[in-house]
Image (tube, rainbow, N blue to C red):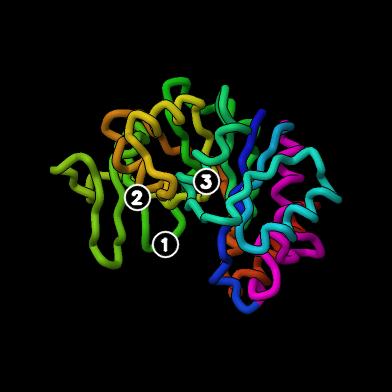
Amino acid sequence: MKALVFAAGLGTRLKPLTDRMPKALVPVAGRPLIDHVLSKLRASGFDDITVNVHHFGSRIRDYLAACDPSVHISDETGFLRETGGGILHARPFLGGGPFLVHNVDILSNIDLSSFVAECREDALSTLVVSSRETSRYFLFDGNLRLCGWTNVKTGEVRSPYPDLDPSECRKLAFSGIHFISGRIFDVFEEENCPERFPITDFYVSICDRYPIYGHVPEGFRMVDVGKLQTLSEAESFAEELSL
């Protein structure tokens, strides 16, 4: 199975650590973040893995060359493409079938093999979501099909459905983990996607025409290691996961 790890971000929320290293190499429980993610992917049967790089990209490339040389590098050193553009740029490594996308700064207890097995065959993409507290949520109907997005702090709502009532939708937070059909690249072409675009905005813009579903794993727990404030929590969680 194929997987793409998003490791190209600037890591601005982890400054000053990321002034001298990429977010992917920030140590958590004695190991770089990317090592935790790659180990989970390997243990779950993902044997064809791509990592995209930008900020301190050569540092990540050197680390992987020494520790996991079979990983493909999707190089965005000269131009950071955001998440949608990152997937599109990695097409030479991902094309031909479905693939998982996993943010490098997410630690979780999800059983990835079970998640993939439970994805609906008609889904263009299946997003791991949960009811955790945040300000931005995807909106889903009763069948967990995506129908929009909202920022509950500002009241902003985005949806291709002009009469969508967010109060009648399930509000669920995205985890940064999604399983995507290989058909996505045809849809990118049909929608004339640029080189740089966010995948979340893209999902919302097409969800009335293509089935995109949410998946809420039972007992799901995660830590977003994108902020300095969560590093200590991540340390404890990573040690718990390795028990």
Residue marked by disc 3 = 86
Q: Residue 133 location in percent, x, y?
A: 43, 61
- Say if residue 70 shows up in the picture: yes
Residue marked by disc 1 = 134
Residue furthest out toward the front: 78
Bounds of the magenta span? 17-45
Category of crowding for the residue at label 2, using alpha-carbon neighbours closer than 10 angstroms: few (below 14), some (14–19), many (at least 20): many
The amino acid sitting under disc 2 is Lys
Disc ID at residue 8: none
Category of crowding for the residue at label 3, using alpha-carbon neighbours closer than 10 angstroms: few (below 14), some (14–19), many (at least 20): many
Q: Secondary structure at mark 2?
A: strand
188 or 13, which lies in front? 188
Q: Secondary structure at mark 3?
A: helix
Instruction: Measure the alpha-carbon separation of dots 2 and 1.
Output: 10 Å
204 or 50, which lies in front? 50
Q: Is residue 161 above or below residue 232?
A: above
Q: Residue 56 location in percent, x, y?
A: 67, 63
Report the residue at 69% width, 38% height from top.
49
Residue furthest out toward the bottom: 16
Judged left or right of residue 191, residue 165 is: left
Residue marked by disc 2 = 171
Q: Are marks 3 and 2 in contact (CB under 8 Å)?
A: no
218 or 231, which lies in front? 231
Mark 3 or 2 closer to N-term?
A: 3
The amino acid sitting under disc 1 is Thr
Instruction: Measure the alpha-carbon separation of dots 3 and 2.
Output: 26 Å
Judged left or right of residue 13, residue 44 is: right
* Residue 169 covered by magenta stretch: no
